[in-house]
Image (cartoon, coloured by chain):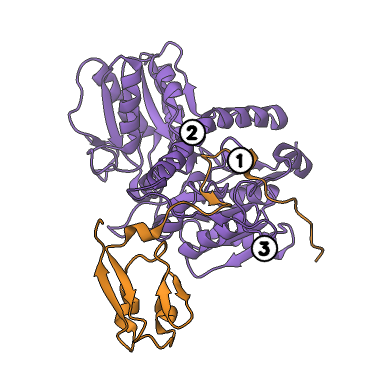
C-alpha cells in the first residue's frame, strides 16, 4: 500500500478545550502523590534489576553501582521495596522539610 | 428521486449506513438490533458496502475497536441496544470527551429485569447523560435519513461528538414501510470530505499522547479537567444549531423536511398538547387529527433531538398551550415519572409560566401505544386543563384491556 506523507502535526488550529491530547510533556508529576519514598542502601544493592522489572511506573534508573527511583515519577507504591531480594530498599515517610 | 424500496427500519438503517460509506463497522448482535447487523454484513458480503466489518467478541470491544479506528481517521458505525449497550458503557462514556464522531444506532429495548427482549426506550434514556447526541426517529425513512445526517452532525468541526440515532425496537426495527433511497452521488455531495481525526490521531508520523492524565487535586490537573468538560458542553450546545442546519440542508437536497429539534403538530389554535418521542408519534398525530375533528383543541409536540435538549424549541412549543400530557416509553425511577416528562418540567422553568402537566408511561417492553391510548391521553390532559390534574403518573398498558380507567 502506498504510504501517504502527512504534514507534521500542528496543534495550533485545534481548540484547546476540544479533547485531551499531549504533544509535549504534561506538568503533572505523579511523584507529587507519594506518601513514602524508596531509599536504596547502596551497600546492599547488587544491581540485580528486580526493582527495575517490577516497578509499575518504570521509574527505576540505573546508576554506576546501584539502582534508584526517579522521584518525579515514583508514586511510592513500595513494590520495589517488597520485591528486592537483598532488602536494599526501605520506604521512608515523606515529611515537609 | 432515487430508488424506492419496501423494507423495515433495521434495513433502512443499514441502507443509510451504506450510503454514508463508513470505513469500519464493528457489531455484536443483540435483539432487536440483530437484523440490522445482519443486513450490514450482507451488504458487505455482496460488495454493496465497501467497509471493513469487524466481528468482535462483545459490545465493549465493539466501541473500543471503533475508538481506535476513529483515532486512525476512519468513518465508523455500530448499532446496539439493551444489555449490549449496558456492556458497552465503559467505552461509551469515554467516546464523547475524546470527541470521536462515531455514529451508532440504538434500536431501543426495555431494561432488564424483569426479563424481556422487546422494545422500550429505557436503554437509550438510561445513558442520556454520557455526552452522546441522541436523536429519535419516527419512521423508517427518517431512520435512513437521520443516520446519514448523523455523520454530518458528528463530524462537524464545531461539534465533534458521537451521535446515537435511536429507533424503537419492534415497532420500527421490524415494521415494513416504503422507503426512498437517496442517490449515492447526492449523499456524497451532502457529506463532503470526511475529517475525523484532525484533533486527536493515532499516527506514528505525528505522535501525540491521546487522553493523557488530568484531574487530581494539585497542579494544572483540575483546571484541565474542567476545561475539557466545559468544552464538551460547548460542543453539545453548538450541536443544536448544527443539527438544525444539517436538517435544513437535507430538506433542500432531498426534499424531505423534518423538525430537527422539536416538531409542533397542530399547535395552531390548540389549548393543550401531548408530548411524544419516537415511533409513537405517528399514532399520536392520528389521534390528534381524530380529536380535532371532534372539536377538541389539542396539538402534539414531538421531541426528535433529546440530547442536547432543545430547551428554547421546547419553550416555544410550550408557550402555545395551557396544559400538556407527556408520554414516555421509559421510566425515571428517581422521579416516579418518565424522563421526557422531567425535561418538559425543567424547560418550563425557563418559560416563566407553569401549566398543568400529566406524566404518562406506556409502550414498555414491546407493548403498543395505540390511537385508543392516545385518545385516553388526550382526554386526561383535557381534564388537567380544566383543573383535574392526576397526582401520579398514569401507566398505559397497566390493564389487559385498552385504557380501562
Q: Quadrant of residue A84?
A: bottom left
Towards the viewer: B285 or B10:
B10
Q: Is residue B100 left or right of residue B353?
A: right
Residue drawn at x 71%, y 57% as measured from the top left: B49
Q: Which chain is purple?
A: B
* Residue located beneath label 1 in the image: A14
Q: Secondary structure at mark 2?
A: helix
Left or right side of B326 for B37? right
* Chain of the residue where label 3 is placed in the rendered structure: B
User: In the image, what residue occupies the spot 29% across and 19% down?
Assistant: B382
Write down which chain is painted orange. A
Pointers 3 and 1 in contact (C-beta within 8 Å): no
Q: Quadrant of the C terminus of chain A?
A: bottom left
Q: Nearer the viewer, mark 3 or mark 2?
A: 2
Q: Which residue is mark 3?
A: B52
Instruction: Pick whichever, A27 or A2, lies toward us.
Output: A27
Chain under label 1?
A
Give x and y (percent) for residue A19. Answer: 52, 45
Picture quadrant where residue B291 is located: top left
Which tag is nearer the camera, tag 3 or tag 1?
1
Q: Nearer the viewer, mark 2 or mark 1?
A: 1
Q: Is residue B273 above or below residue A53?
A: above
Image quarter for residue B152?
top right
Q: State the mark number for residue B234.
A: 2
Circle 3/circle 2 CB separation < 8 Å: no
Which numbered disc flags the more N-terminal residue, 3 or 2?
Answer: 3
| Chain of the residue displaying label 2 | B
Amino acid at each position: 500500500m502506498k504510504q501517504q506523507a502527512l504534514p507534521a502535526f500542528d496543534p495550533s488550529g485545534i481548540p484547546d478545550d476540544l479533547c485531551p491530547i499531549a504533544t509535549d510533556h504534561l506538568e503533572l508529576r505523579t511523584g507529587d502523590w507519594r506518601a513514602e519514598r524508596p531509599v536504596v542502601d547502596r551497600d546492599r544493592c547488587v544491581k540485580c534489576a528486580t526493582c527495575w522489572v517490577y516497578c509499575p511506573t518504570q521509574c527505576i534508573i540505573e546508576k554506576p553501582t546501584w539502582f534508584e527511583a526517579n522521584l518525579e515519577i515514583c508514586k511510592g507504591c513500595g513494590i520495589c521495596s517488597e520485591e528486592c531480594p537483598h532488602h536494599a530498599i526501605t520506604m521512608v515517610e515523606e515529611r515537609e522539610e | 428521486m432515487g430508488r424506492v424500496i419496501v423494507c423495515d427500519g433495521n434495513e433502512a438503517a443499514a441502507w443509510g449506513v451504506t450510503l454514508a460509506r463508513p470505513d469500519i463497522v464493528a457489531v455484536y448482535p443483540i435483539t432487536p438490533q440483530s437484523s440490522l447487523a445482519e443486513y450490514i454484513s450482507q451488504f458487505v458480503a455482496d460488495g454493496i458496502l465497501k467497509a471493513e466489518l469487524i466481528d468482535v467478541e462483545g459490545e465493549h470491544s465493539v466501541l473500543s475497536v471503533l475508538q481506535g479506528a476513529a483515532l486512525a481517521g476512519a468513518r465508523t458505525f455500530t448499532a446496539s441496544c439493551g444489555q449490549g449497550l449496558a456492556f458497552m458503557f465503559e467505552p461509551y462514556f469515554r467516546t464523547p470527551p475524546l470527541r470521536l464522531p462515531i455514529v451508532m444506532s440504538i434500536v431501543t429495548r426495555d431494561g432488564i429485569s424483569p426479563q424481556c427482549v422487546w422494545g422500550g426506550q429505557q436503554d437509550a434514556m438510561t445513558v442520556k447523560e454520557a455526552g452522546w447526541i441522541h436523536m429519535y426517529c419516527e419512521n423508517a425513512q427518517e431512520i435512513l435519513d437521520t443516520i446519514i445526517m448523523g455523520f454530518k452532525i458528528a463530524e462537524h468541526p464545531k461539534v465533534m461528538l458521537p451521535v446515537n440515532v435511536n429507533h424503537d425496537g419492534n415497532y420500527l426495527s421490524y415494521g415494513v414501510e416504503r422507503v426512498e433511497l437517496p442517490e449515492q452521488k447526492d449523499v456524497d455531495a451532502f457529506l463532503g470530505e470526511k475529517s475525523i481525526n484532525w484533533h486527536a490521531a493515532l499516527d506514528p508520523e505525528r505522535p501525540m499522547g491521546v487522553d493523557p492524565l488530568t484531574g487530581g487535586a494539585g497542579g494544572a490537573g483540575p483546571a484541565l479537567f474542567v476545561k475539557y468538560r466545559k468544552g464538551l458542553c460547548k460542543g453539545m450546545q453548538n450541536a443544536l444549531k448544527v443539527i438544525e442546519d444539517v436538517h435544513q440542508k437535507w430538506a433542500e437536497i432531498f426534499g424531505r423536511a423534518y423538525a430537527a429539534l422539536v416538531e409542533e403538530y397542530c399547535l395552531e389554535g390548540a389549548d393543550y398538547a401531548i408530548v411524544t418521542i419516537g415511533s409513537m408519534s405517528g399514532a399520536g398525530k392520528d389521534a390528534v387529527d381524530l380529536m380535532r375533528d371532534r372539536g377538541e383543541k389539542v396539538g402534539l409536540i414531538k421531541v426528535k433531538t433529546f440530547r442536547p435538549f432543545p430547551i428554547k424549541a421546547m419553550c416555544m412549543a410550550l408557550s402555545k398551550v395551557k396544559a400538556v400530557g407527556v408520554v414516555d416509553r421509559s421510566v425515571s425511577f428517581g422521579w416516579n415519572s418518565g424522563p421526557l416528562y422531567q425535561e418538559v418540567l425543567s424547560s418550563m422553568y425557563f418559560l416563566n409560566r407553569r401549566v398543568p402537566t400529566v406524566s404518562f408511561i406506556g409502550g414498555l417492553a414491546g407493548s403498543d401505544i395505540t390511537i385508543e391510548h392516545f385518545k385516553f391521553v388526550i382526554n386526561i390532559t383535557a381534564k388537567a386543563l380544566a383543573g383535574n390534574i392526576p397526582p401520579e403518573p398514569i401507566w398505559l398498558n397497566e390493564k389487559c384491556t385498552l385504557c380501562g380507567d
